[in-house]
Amino acid sequence: MSTIYIHWPFCLSKCYYCDFNSVKCLGDIDFRKWLNLYKKVLKRFKKDFYKNENITSIYFGGGTPSLLPEWFVSDLIEEINNNFNLIQLAEITLEVNPKTVTKQKLLNFKKGGINRLSIGVQSIRDGDLKLLGRIHNAKSAKECVFEALEVFDNLSIDMIYNRPGQNLTDWESELAEVLSWPINHVSLYELIIKDNTRLKQMIKEGRVPYPDRTDRLFEKTIEITEQAGFEMYEVSNFAKCQMYGKHNLSYWNYEDYYGIGPGSHSRVTIGSEKIAIAQISNNLEWLNWAEDLNFEIETLSEDEIFEEMCIMGLRAKCGLNLKKISEKIKIKYDLQNKIEKLMKNSYIIKRGDRIVLTKEGIKRLNLVIEFLVKEGPYENFN
């Protein structure tokens, strides 16, 4: 099984906290040229790497892919369907900025093959939306969600917490309100202040306070989502009725994926090897590269694969599959002893051939990963 990620790099404006590979749209875009080059890259993936496996999901991310014309999205889905084994019940997700769609546009997206939305609400507090550099307000965000619910029965909402000046009571009230809406999935991300973002500069200049990170915000997030009937199936993702995001689950299970577009990444299994493929981030350079494309391939070492498996698998409820780890790596990293120490500290539990983080372990996710991927025996962990 594999998945396909389509990256659209343009936005109406750059959010203040964003360090993703996206740029403000300046001037007209030649959509037909971009579409033809996306198709060209897809066909090259098929020729060079595709093994006739099932494609279980497609994800349009960005940037702001809801800025795309409906025909662009439907044409690309059709191209994938014609050239790859796209399963009948494939999950096909589109990221949406509330300010960029109408109900009619959502209907057209659905008609073209989209069956799931991920709506970037981020907050329902106008002051915080302004602080984050979002182009919508709370009213338009809620209107977008409820209009989308009239069209789609599978959608997710993105929210950000640990915002500058935010306290526990504010977050509790805001999150409870969002979870009262008739939705089945939320992605709740802790704000990380990244270098080279406008928000980092605003903090440096003293215009806004640095977020006072506390485990209580995360603990309260788990508490409120559980009370509302949402299951935490990954560190930042919560679902009702097991409406998990299938595309992201494939990442956490370390399955193969093909990335298309500027700055996208791919992981492909060839025989006993796992290869990494990265595409140029700069838009103009990517366009020139795609005209006469030549993939730059890196064969990952066993150590790199092990580290990636830990980073991805331990985030999710399904956990890290020990059966996929070679005996050589288990011995090299002293995994048996490390796992026993983590279990003794109540940071992980074992479920069959998998290890899964406990709630206490989730709070120390990065430390647990660091502990496991440090080569050789490692005696201390606190």
Image: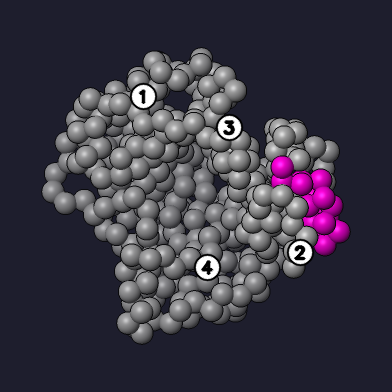
Classify mark 2: helix, strand or loop: loop
Q: Which mark is residue 42?
A: 1
Q: Amino acid at mark 2?
A: Asn
Query: Who's the residue at 36% across and 79% down the image?
Result: 204
Quarter occupied by residue 361: bottom right
Q: State the residue in front, 346 or 15.
A: 346
Query: Who's the residue at 86% across and 59% down the image?
Result: 344
Would you say 31 lies left or right of 14 here?
A: left
Specify the quadrant that holds the N terminus. Answer: top right
Classify mark 1: helix, strand or loop: helix
Q: CA distance from mark 4 to mark 3?
A: 29 Å
Q: In the rendered structure, which disc, 1 or 2, sits on the residue that comes first in sequence? A: 1
Q: Amino acid at mark 4?
A: Tyr
Q: Which mark is residue 301?
A: none
Q: State the residue in front, 222 or 316.
A: 316
Would you say 266 lies left or right of 363 here?
A: left
Q: In the rendered structure, which disc, 3 or 1, sits on the residue that comes first in sequence? A: 1
Q: In the rendered structure, which disc, 4 or 3, sits on the residue that comes first in sequence? A: 4
Q: Neighbour class for label 2 at 10 Å: few (<14), some, many (≥20)?
A: few
* 51 vs 34: above or below: above
User: Where does label 2 land, which residue?
Assistant: 380
Q: Amino acid at mark 3?
A: Glu
Magenta segment, principal secondary structure? Answer: helix
Q: Amino acid at mark 1?
A: Leu
Q: Is residue 244 visible?
A: no
Q: Which mark is residue 161?
A: 4
- Residue extent of the magenta highlight: 332-346
User: Where does label 3 land, which residue?
Assistant: 255
